[in-house]
Amino acid sequence: MSLLNQPFEQRSNCLGFRLGTLESRHDNFRIESLTKEDDRKTKENDALLIEALNGLTFEERQEQQEIVHGVDEMDADESTFIDSALQDLDRILLGTKKGTVYETAEALNPEYVNARAFRIMFLRGNRYDAKASAKQMLSFFEWKKQLFGEEKLVKDITMDDLDEDDRACLRTGYLQIAGKDRSNRIIILIIPGMRCFKTLMNEFRSRYYIWMTALKSEECQRRGAVVLSYAIGDFKDKKQGGGYMENTRLTLALPLHQAAIHLFTENAAEYIVGNGAIRIMPRKIRARFRIHFGSHMECQYLLSTYGIAAWILPLKPITFEMNLEQHHRWFQSCLVNDTSDCSDLVRTQTINIEYNENDVLYVACKKSPNAGNDRLRALVTDMSQIYDSGTKEKKRMVVDGMIGEIQKTGGRFLKRHPESQSDWTEIPLDEVRLKITQMFRNHRRRADALIQGGRLITGEPLSNDVVFGKTHRSRGSDLMHHLIKERSDEYNALDRGMKVQVVDGLIQRIRDEGGRFLQPAPDDGGWLEVTNEMARVRISKYFRNNRRHTKKN
């Protein structure tokens, strides 16, 4: 029996890394408590990562930082150089394929092996490096033969090619296509604590299937993917790192460009396990490798700094249990229709359950009476002075603290799904921050208006009133926006002194119609009629926004 096909418990320590006594220590394992040998390995890891960054040019380091943080731009058009890269790839393979499994596959079905789209996939995965692509193609077919046999070398692997144990391993959710980051890259989530298989071959075949499913998307081929290994709390690897090296080698044989690799752990032992993987990583991949220590909440915050919304992790609030509903829907979809691009059936933000009272609901042009919204508005009022007087970093901490307060109660930040009035969509964390920041600005603006002579009014706005903000629509507001569009060319052509006359004329037109200029009062206590000076500032901003929108279109 092949060593890889032996039951996991029967295998010796020669495969992968085993933590031994390290895993038996207290969960809150600190680097300072490691043995001298462990400390040496930790320093080796640090040195390898630093060496990888130092081996890059300044431009390459800058590019890697942008990619890792999810703020890079789309790659340049490949059509200008792809034909030349394909010719180089053909030339290199011609000199290296003799006696390899690649040569066997080519003899079985040359159309499959030499297909343009198939070869471009490897070039994209290696950033159009023909030599690296050729080497990976040879390794790819070696692994494919080992996993599925020679008879399946020249066919796309489907669910039908996975046996019952392979599917059971895949269904555990140890590997998931979890969503996309800010740069629209697919995120592959690895949860070491959920590893469950009869033999390592089951895990290898499920990994192959996940990776190649993601690669059905041409965008994923070009943009690459972000890999997250999440080993916090109960999700630490219960297999003690077994098969770690083989999984890494298999991953390097698959043509998926790993734009960034993040290892989240609260245990330094996991860091040491990664030593072998770091050693065999190519330098450029090593430069995109990041290790993060912390709790569930700390790691979710860290994710946001790398362009990854916290909701990407399928964790239930408060309990931090893994929610596998979306993964199981993905799994079922692949069972039903394996020929489609199942990578698009990733974890989405759509929620198919009723919202709860602790959720913060965003409904266009309406103020939600939900308890979660009331709690958020109260937090804005309570924290406004601290926020307004703080530095940029302090303001961010205030906003993140408020988000944490909502999440502690089991609340989420939801908006209506654009294609359904019954479903809700969870808002990405970055968008939530923007909304809360805008709430603070609105609160400050209302307070300033009261100080500068604004007048509190009783009752609801009249039809001809202009109400600043998105929560109220009226005939007066519609008239104002119509006049802004009508007179925008005239406004833009004038110098600053003359522009005031256009704005004052618009204000007078509204007042002649019997309208007032209103905005919500501080602390949501009714309505505030603003002065002409305040209205002038707001309307001038509308003119500027209209100009920007016109230029953009």
Image (spheres, rainbow, N blue to C red):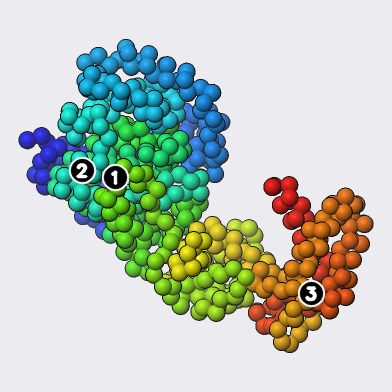
Q: Name the residue that disc number 2 marks.
A: 160
How crowded pointer 2 is (Cα within 10 Å; few <14, some 14-19, many 20+) is rated as: few
Q: Name the residue that disc number 3 marks.
A: 517
Task: State the residue in front, 404 or 32.
Answer: 404
Q: Position of residue 291 (x, y in %)?
A: 39, 46
**Closer mark to the observer between disc 3 and disc 1:** 1
Q: Residue furthest top?
A: 95
Q: Earlier in the sequence, mark 3 or mark 2?
A: 2
For the residues labelled 3 and 2, the Cα–Cα distance comes to 66 Å
Is residue 360 toward the left or the right of residue 289 in the image? right
Q: Name the residue that disc number 1 marks.
A: 338
| Kind of residue at badge 3 | Phe
Q: Are marks 2 and 1 in contact (CB under 8 Å)?
A: yes
Residue in the image at 51% along x and 71% along y: 360
Task: Report which quarter residue 295 is drawn in.
Answer: bottom left
Task: Report which quarter residue 368 is drawn in.
Answer: bottom right
Residue in the image at 50% along x and 37% along y: 64
